[in-house]
Each structure stands twice: as C-alpha cells, then as structure tokens.
Amino acid sequence: MSTAPGRTGAGGTAPGGTTTEAELRRLAGAVPDPELPVLTLEDLGVLRAVRVLGPGRAEVDLTPTYTGCPAVESMAADVTGVLAAHGWQAEVRTVLSPAWSTDWISAEGRRKLREYGIAPPGPARPRSGPVPVELSVRCPRCGSPDTALLSRFSSTACKALRRCRACDEPFEHFKEV
C-alpha cells in the first residue's frame, strides 16, 4: 500500500446498507488514470481522501502529479461519473499541498508500470535516514541498467524517454518527483 496522506482501509457497507467512506474510496480509487489507463487513481496515489458529507453527497480530494496536469479535470469527471452511477453526488477538489510525490505510487502501481513497459520511478524514499540513490534506470523489458536518456519529456511531462543500450529498445521512465 502506498503512503499518500489520507488513505483509508478496505471498503465495505455499514449496517443497514449505508455506503461507507471506505467503499466510496474503493470505487473512486478504481478509476483508471486517463493518461496511463493501466494504473488506477489509487495505484498512482493521486486519490487523497473521500468524505461523506451527508446522504448521497461526498467530497473527493485529488492531487495531480504536476500542478498544471491537464488530466486532473478528466480524473475529476471520471470519479464524479463513477460515484453518480452508484447514487452519489460528488464534489471533487484539487489539493496541491502537500505536493504529489512518486513515493505515493503503490507497489502494485510500480509493478503495473514495469509490466506495461514503463520504467517505474526509483524506490520510495524513507521518511528518515539515508536516501537511496538510483544511479541508472533499468530497462523494463530486459532489466539492463545500461540505458541512455533521449529526452527529458515523453508523452507526458511526468515521463522521460530513454533507450536501452542492451536490447536497443526505447522506453518511457516515470520520473521521480
């Protein structure tokens, strides 16, 4: 499980059939990221909080990967639509502080990125103690650390374009933030 602030446990329904915040979080968290549909909003760590405001009303906090990320509007619309399909009116808020970090990508999200052919960011930084330093980006296809940066930006601002010198394949790398 990733370490984004405001995370809650597994979903469920309260006695009497009332939907809990955890169940709403499960629904909102299962929404695919519009730019990387292999990841859910929960995998990516952009889903910050879900609160029940009253009967049939909820508030959802999202933190985009970058302050100007154009996908946040699509994420908000998708979350609103999923919750509406389950009878909920949701207000989605964009929360910028604390800023999103690649540390919030779950272990499952990192696995999915690698399987999709995108090198995940380096390991999550510890809250204290020495910071692990990754001197190279491993190729998600062959695992070689012998890779070269082709462009600091790729299909989105949060990814760079690299090439593996071992298998000669280009690949994207989700940049550490």
Image (cartoon, grey):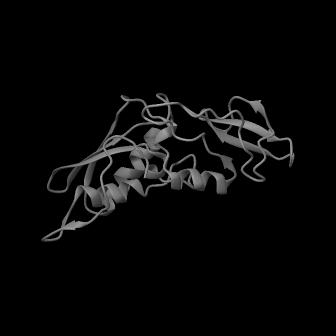
Residue 151 visible to the viewer: yes
Q: Residue at x 44, y 40 (%)?
A: 73
Q: Residue at x 53, y 52 (%)?
A: 109
Q: Which image quadrant is residue 162 in?
A: top right
Q: Residue furthest front?
A: 129
Q: Quadrant of the C terminus?
A: top right
Q: Count of labels shown?
A: 0
Q: Nearer the viewer, residue 46 or 136?
A: 136
Q: Residue 176's spot in the image, x, y percent?
A: 58, 34
Camera-nearest residue between 143 and 24 = 143
Q: Is residue 25 left or right of residue 17?
A: right
Of 75 and 165, nearer the camera is: 165
Residue 71 visible (yes or no) = no
Residue 144 lies, with reference to residue 150, above or below; the image says: below
Q: Position of residue 33 (x, y in %)?
A: 51, 49
Task: Tell whether 93 sits left or right of 170.
Answer: left
Q: In the image, residue 75 lies at what x, y percent?
A: 44, 46
Q: Quadrant of residue 132?
A: top right
Image spot of residue 152 (x, y percent): 70, 28
Residue visible at 71% across and 50% down in the picture: 140
Please name whichever residue, 176 or 57, is drawn nearer the observer in this view of the structure: 176
Is residue 96 positioned above or below 137 on the image? above
